[in-house]
Amino acid sequence: MHASEEAQTESDASRSTDQETPARREFLRRGITAGGAAVLAGLAPESRAAAATPQWMTRPGQPFSNYGLPSPHEKAVIRLIAANSAVSGNGLSWTPLHDLEGTLTPNGLHFERHHNGVPQIDPAGHRLYLHGLFERSLSFGVDDLLRYPMVSQQCFIECGGNSNSGWNEEPLQAPAGSLHGLASCSEWTGVPLSVILEECGLHPDAQWLIAEGADAAAMNVSIPIGKARGDALLALYQNGERLRPENGYPLRLVLPGWEGVLSVKWLRRLQAATEPVMARNETARYTELLPSGKARQFTFVIEAKSVITRPSPGQHLAAPGWYPISGLAWSGRGVIKRVEVSTDGGKSWIDANLQTPVLPRCFTRFRLPWRWNGESCILQSRATDETGYVQPTRPALIAERGRHGYFHYNAIVSWEVSEDGSLSHVYA
Amino acid sequence: MSMPESSAPSAARLEERTARRGPQFASALLLGLLTAPAFPVAGPGLGQALSAAEVAAININVFPNGAGLPPGRGTVADGQALYAARCEACHGIRGSGGSADELAGGAHGLRGNPPDKTIGTYWPYATTLFDYIRRSMPPTAPRSLSDDEVYALTAYLLSLNGIIHGGDTLDAVSLARIRMPNRDGFIPVDAR
């Protein structure tokens, strides 16, 4: 077992599944025979009795609860917050991606980006107004919308500003969630926007919908009519329950695969127009300045991206041996076709297993068993989507965009494992 | 703008129309229904008509061509006094050095390192300033400024950025006429 790092062969990787991999068999064998027995053997007789019958098996448990909460032992799994000192509701909180598994984000951990706080909306006093280039200007109460035909759609939402510390000269040291956690994935349920546009009778000259939220920033942005008539959703439910206030209660737009600022929360108004409104958040912000001095604008689609969430900075490898590499990949253009993992800083790549079903515009979980040999090494992941687009290296992205674009950073992420088992963020 | 009585496709209204158009339409509709999904493609038609006055009361979008700008006017001088009272605490004296975004005083242009993206160097449209201040600022009391005050603050910030003169007054016509230096600085990527 002291041999140098045992990179899995391609055929091992493609044969393996989550249930049965060579690594898992090895892990179980070592865990039970060596590790498990050693732990039990070291315990005093009384605590061996306690281990045989833990205290929670000797007394009745807690009663029922009206709304379940995580175990108190998981209280460190939280959204970390960064907000403006003078305007506490202007800022963000990150999904702790490094503490989560699977593909769906728990509602209480969905990332937040608010411009002026979370409005406390009474649904009885909230309406959706549609006006402008329609045959009919109409308004809808929340109760009205609940009677419309609904669809459910799983998708990620990612802030255009996610991962933006990647543009920095020096790699920022923070947990994976605090670097890349302005992205979350949910099942959203609601009324297709197209149904409501149909009822209002969209004028053929309408090219844009100007969406506005009912928050204290009255946040507004312009949405091309094609997306609005396509898969845009007027979401009322998130992962089966009504939206959380911080995710737009009682009504939000969801534009699958497009940058998060367009999925307007607390949706109140849609004006159909021939031109975009050129709001502050689609001109001064959410645009990407290039080295030429020109700026990319209306960069809606989230390009393919991936990050290893485990192991990642803040976590620690206790000793050489088998560890699962686990991470997330996503693309606003559709399905993730392939995620490759490198444990040698990009010199060689191995295909990771993709958790099925792989859904378009959703978080895709990739996993790969890995044996750490105790030496320093660099872990990376690289996503390819159904269009053939391959997640770029950091130098390639910077060569194309410069370093002052601020938004839409999607380069390959590198974690360095040190000989002491600690992990740090590096540029490689 | 005349608002035709809502003809949303509720079941009752469809029946009405079917009745009016006679048996040919009815059989076409029936054929459609045979192959239709179990759910209605359209909604139940619950939208309530909005009057032009109701729309005017809620519509605060201001477009680059000036559409949506309200009546009213404001001077740079009035804006300067308002700015000191309502904005300076966060945005700093003359628009820089505060806790919030820099609004003026960009020392170098868009190709500097780091570049200076301010209203004068970066914003493509002056109307955006009116739209944004009226809807969002100040964060402690949004929607508390009168339209005249928003014109005055817009005028002051544009003068700080060297776009208009200190003696100028802004109204709907003069604001929409302003051409910002970085008007052509943007490349639309996914705009359609």
Image (cartoon, grey):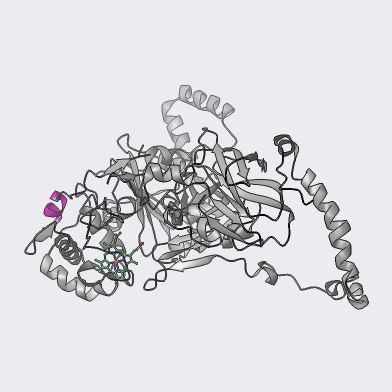
Q: Position of residue B115 (x, y in %)?
A: 29, 55
Q: Position of residue A376 (x, y in %)?
A: 63, 55
Q: Residue at x 46, y 35 (%)?
A: B14
Residue A393 horizontal side relative to residue A23, left or right: left
Which one is nearer the viewer's eye here, B8 or A191? A191
Magenta stretch: give its range: B172-177
B95 to A306, vertically: above or below: below
Q: Residue at x 41, y 46 (%)?
A: A398
Which one is nearer the viewer's eye here, A226 or A415? A415
B83 to A422, vertically: above or below: below
Residue A294 horizontal side relative to residue A299, left or right: left
Q: Residue at x 31, y 71 (%)?
A: B141
Q: Answer whether residue B174 is magenta in the image.
A: yes
Q: Of all residues shown, which one is farthest toward the top?
A: B24
Which one is nearer the viewer's eye here, A329 or A36? A36
Which one is nearer the viewer's eye here, A240 or B3? A240
